[in-house]
Amino acid sequence: MNRKHVAGWVLYDFANSVYPAVIIAVVFSVYFGENIVGNEPKGAGDFWWGMVASTSALFVALSSPLLGSIADRAGVRKRMLFIFAYLCIVAVALFPTIQPGMIWWGFCLAVLANIGFEGSLVYYNAYLPDIAPADRQGFVSGLGFGVGYAGSIAGLLIALLFVRAGRFDLVWYSVAAFFALFSIPAFLWMPADRRGERTIVQAAADGLIGFKRLVGEVLRERELRRFLLSYFFFIDGVLTTMYFSSRFARETLQFSINGLIYLFIVVQISALIGALALARPTDVWGPKRVITYTLFLWTAVVIASFFVQSKGTFVVIALVAGFGLGSIQSASRTLMARLIPKGKESQMFGFYAFCGKSSSVIGPIVFGTVSARSGGDQRLAILSVGALFFIGLILLQRVKAPTIPSAE
């Protein structure tokens, strides 16, 4: 295992994690609803933020298998990673141009930023089987998420300084600069692109023609298709929770914006601990068992959130959720890597993104619509998320995970 490759890969997670923490989870999601959209009528902010999440998820879902094919066949994985990363960075750097009432301009920039962030993960995730042997993939995947949460904490602390000063424009600039600066080692140290067997145009044509074949290949891999069906449901629950947790805390429990940042800093610490604590057990117990345990935890978190009345209780619930956040994503990525046929990493991780993002069109729309139609009742909206975790948990039990012999 090349430590330089692993270091570059892990540092990319440190760099890009500032985006979901500051933009998706805490500051921009609230700022967009309150300052750009305005939350009248009640639930309007939830509705528009749900549309941002669902539109970007739909684009990534439809394009990921094609783009994954291009990366595999044309040998341009690192270049595609760079393009999508900087799409996100540039879009965030333009956030200061969004003024109150400019809903469509804010919507477009937020969608582009999400597409850049989520699209880059297709190529980033596909590196895992290349940089780590099968018996170490759980550890490396968990390490990436753990270091990523350290990046989230650093980004939130920087954002807090500017939020206190009322300089939201500097919050957006700091996110773009953080992502750009700390992603440099990844582009320098991760494995170079291999010479492709096809040109980009030819690979794109192959991807369009080959998507049906790819679906057929996935369907022939029994355990892979079973896992992806389960993943389709539970990852929708995870991503919907990430998109709306801060809005729930702000609107329903009346957290201040500073209080939200402090809360999510603590949650990121909890997530870091969870990702690192369960990294080695993912290799020892197997990723399926880790996912199962965390799905029980997430189901309990949603039920508790429906009944929560006090800020203090919600902090405890958020800490528990944070512990399971990194582990469920890391273990899912590890199980996927183990189930993929050799040589088809980018294509299959493209399909992995397709399943995750196509499902993630559903959750945010349902949450936002239920909130808007019920006059802003977010407790009612959150119940739909619990059903996604429960269905995913049941379907996961049908998956027979491969046994990986230890290298020791």
Image (cartoon, rainbow, N blue to C red):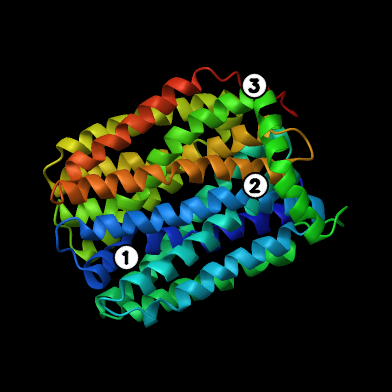
Residue underneath mark 1: 27
> Given the image, on which type of amino acid does mark 2 rest?
Pro
Q: Residue at x 50, y 35 (%)?
A: 278
Query: Whole-Å distance between the Cαs marked 2 and 3?
Result: 19 Å
Mark in the foreground, 1 or 2:
2
Q: Residue at x 56, y 69 (%)?
A: 87
- Res 261 → quadrant: bottom left
Query: What kind of element bears circle 1?
Result: helix
In the image, taking residue 106 as reference, residue 307 lies left or right, namely: left
Q: List x then y, in percent, for residue 187.
A: 70, 65
Of residue 214 and residue 291, the one placed in the foreground of this image is: 214
Residue underneath mark 3: 222
Task: Give the mark nearest the N terminus, 1 or 3.
Answer: 1
Task: Give the mark nearest the N terminus, 2 or 3.
Answer: 2
Counting other residues with Cα less than 10 Å from the Cα at mark 3, is it few (<14), some (14-19), or many (20 or more)? few
| Quarter of the rendering occupied by the N terminus | top right
Q: List x then y, in percent, for residue 130.
A: 75, 45
Q: Residue at x 21, y 34 (%)?
A: 304
In the image, taking residue 37 as reference, residue 196 lies left or right, namely: right
